[in-house]
Amino acid sequence: MNDRIWFSDFKYKNKGLLVKKTGAHIPFAWSLFHDVFSWFAFYFFAQSWRIGRRLSGYKRPTIAFFPDKPRPWYFIWPVMHVAGAKIISDTSAADIVFQFDDATVTNNTPPLTRADAVLVNFECNDISKSLIETVFAQAAGYDLGVDPRTYTGAMVEKSELNGAHDGRIIVGPMEPIEGKTYQRLIDNEIEGGLVEDLRTCIVGGEPTIIYRKRRRLDRRFMNENDEVILDRIDKVFSPEEIDIIRRFAAGIKLDWGGVDVLRDRTSGKIHIVDANKTDMGPPIALPIGGKLRATRRMAKGFAHAFSRKRA
């Protein structure tokens, strides 16, 4: 992949970077430069895996992406290299064809592929917040979404769009704003004045790894973490909760991606509040050792779920 195309993904706007595909805005700050440095350290290791696979003579499955190709900051990029996959452009020749599009609602008509090709995420064409609420209620048996016209008390207003990070707490009842969705406020506060998101990564519809992402209460809706801990799925979730996540992934047809899970400290119940099929990662705040372990675990899941060519 030609690394020079990375820069076309961004545009300078309002003293920051605008991600053209999703509309997300990243303000310039010293923390941004620190994050870039941390990412390049991980990128170096990912490149070494990529070169090592080439030199080893490993018989690699081929993978093509459609309609877009992932940049190195998307989690699939290091994972596929550790798994030994080789990127090609011709979808009709690839062993694996991966639907890759950052948009919230996508046209997932498959391109020309081989009859035996493994298709990834082609049935997942909508990750809007309102659909997530509906599918979660079906999977869990209890609701997350609320009607702002009749709901009394604190609730969260957020954009339907993927990657907006524009959530805010408001008090109902109120008239809804077009393009927004409304959810009950989940009390996911932990000790130390922090909130904890349980970012769960999916491979082949199966919850595979989890990050405990922690940040200050006053920055609960920001994508900036004070601490990230890599943990085991069976250590964080009960078997019943793992089944809820599986049913949710099946409901939105998510083969690969990430879901944001919050645990309410009063009820103890989990709530899936977001899903992403073009997951970035590992998180910048995760130490390099954790990044490497997370990538290897996901690569093992990738090979098991999608690859038909193994060493």
Image (cartoon, grey):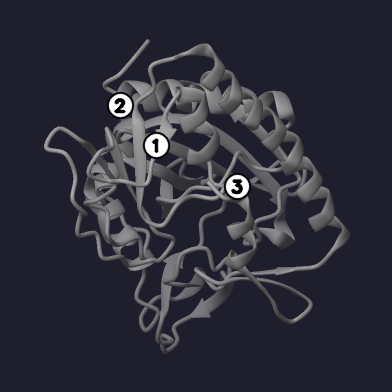
Q: Which of the 4 image quarters holds residue 161?
A: bottom left
Q: Residue furthest right?
A: 30
Q: Residue at 74% across / 81% down in the picture?
A: 14
Q: Which is nearer the eye, 23 or 157?
A: 23
Choose top left, top right, bottom left or bottom right for residue 133.
Answer: bottom left
Q: Name the residue under label 3.
A: 73
Q: What residue type is labelled 3?
A: Trp
Question: What x and y, as percent, mark residue 44?
Answer: 71, 33
Q: Give the labeled residue for mark 2.
A: 305
Earlier along the polypeptide chain: callout 1 or callout 3?
Answer: 3
Density class for disc 3 (Cα within 10 Å; few <14, some 14-19, many ≥20) is: some
Residue 61 appears left or right of 261 = left
Q: Residue at x 35, y 43 (%)?
A: 64
Give SS at disc 3. loop
Q: Please report whichever mark, 2 or 1, sits nearer to the chain's N-terminal start.
A: 1
Neighbourhood count class around disc 1 (C-alpha, 10 Å): few under 14, some 14–19, many 20 upward: many
Residue at image position (56%, 69%) is 167
Q: Name the residue under label 1.
A: 202
Disc 1 residue type (three-letter): Ile
Q: In this view, does 172 lie above or below 158?
A: below
Give the Cα distance between marks 2 and 3: 22 Å
Q: Where is residue 96 in the image (x, y as percent from the top left)?
A: 29, 36
